[in-house]
Amino acid sequence: MKIFQEIIQQTDFQQEDLVRLLSAENEERILLFEKASQVKRETIGNKVYFRGLVEFSNICSKDCLYCGIRKSNTNVIRYDVANSEILEACRFAWENRFGSVVLQSGELSSPVFVNRVDHLLKEIKKLSNGELGITLSCGEQSRETYRRWFESGAHRYLLRIESSNPELYKKIHPDNEHHFYEKRLECLHLLKETGYQTGTGVMIGFPFQTLEDLADDLLFFKKMDIDMIGMGPYVEHEDTPLYVYRHLLKTRQERFDLALKMVATLRLLMPDVNIAAATALQAIDPVGREKAVKVGANIIMPNLTPCDYRKEYQLYEGKPCLDEDASLCKNCLEARIEISGSEIGYGEWGDSKHYLRKTGRS
Ligand code: SAH
Ligand code: SF4
């Protein structure tokens, strides 16, 4: 059997190597984190980029078994942030030299929704003289919709695969045509074809998931040649069907630690991609995102959703910063990122080196 010190020096990894890295404890865990931090520094440097996150609507047509804003959860008050407020949040991002914003919502595909997002994209480009980068995270859409939004100014899209194992995907989604693994996969291909910088990711530590599954998720990102990845711990929500399996879960702290190891291991496997420090990390540890930055992440998404709406966008329990407005959020993050030894890439898009290299732009 290979020794751990040899595995972390590799540049290519098999499933068993990745499982070994994800199982690292004590000194091996520290070695993994140090190596990932070194690879990050040497490949993409020490900059962290901000993407201002606007959770503009919690209305969703889907019923993912893990998610607090799923259609069937009647305890949620549904909202749609007014266009003027969304644009105000984006203006804040631009004036404060965040390079980009992320517009995220529940999944809808009605013409009204598609037109609305399209309109917002054009307005955001206008108000920022084309300077703000725009990422969308609005779920599965048709080829035409993806193309239309791309042409109106979105250049990145986040669609997590949640689990790259089709059997496991089935276990955490209702068994109907609105929740097909194949459709999700097809959407990722459509996004790439359309020209988006494509982001995906998984939840870490949900019931039935094994370390082998997580290792396969990492290999899936590599095989799909993904540009940006966002992965965070699964955090149970009591108003969801998956909650009944909570006795199968690792402790929250263990899930958090596994998420850090996933980030570090991914940095070794794909040195030049963008890796987001997921907000769910902060639901478990107040400085969780900064810890992820230390071991390989380079993207943070400060929440710019107007405060009144935040408590109704609880995908999971214990969501942080429910009452911090955007400027407070920014100051608090800034200080903490600088303490963690990184620099903030103000006013820069911070596209993934992976994407730039692939498209011949670096
Ligand atoms: N509706 C869109 C975007 C909003 S959901 C979509 O589904 O793509 C964004 C992400 O939140 C999901 O991809 C999922 O990975 C994450 N999420 C949902 N419920 C969660 C939970 N209980 N714990 C951790 N992450 C969760
Ligand atoms: Fe809707 Fe996204 Fe939640 Fe699924 S994960 S229920 S699509 S908001």
Image: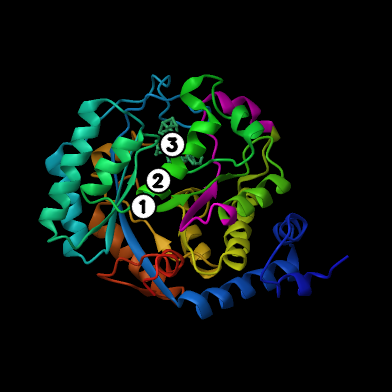
Where are the magenta residues, as a range?
Answer: 222-247
Foreground residue among 105 and 286: 105
Label 1 element class: loop
Residue bearing the label numbered 3: 315
Whether the residue under disc 3 has CB within 8 Å of ligand 1: yes
**Left-right relation of 95 to 134:** left
Instruction: Identify residue type, mark 2.
Output: Leu
Q: As displayed, is residue 81 above or below residue 134?
A: above
Residue bearing the label numbered 2: 191
**Left-right relation of 24 to 257:** right
> Given the current orientation, which residue lies at the most extreme right position?
1
Residue bearing the label numbered 1: 196
Residue 346 quadrant: bottom left
Residue 51 quadrant: bottom left
Residue shown at 74%/57% (left/top)? 23
Instruction: Identify residue type, mark 3.
Output: Leu
Distance Cα–Cα, label 3 vs label 2: 24 Å
Residue 161's spot in the image, x, y percent?
A: 52, 41
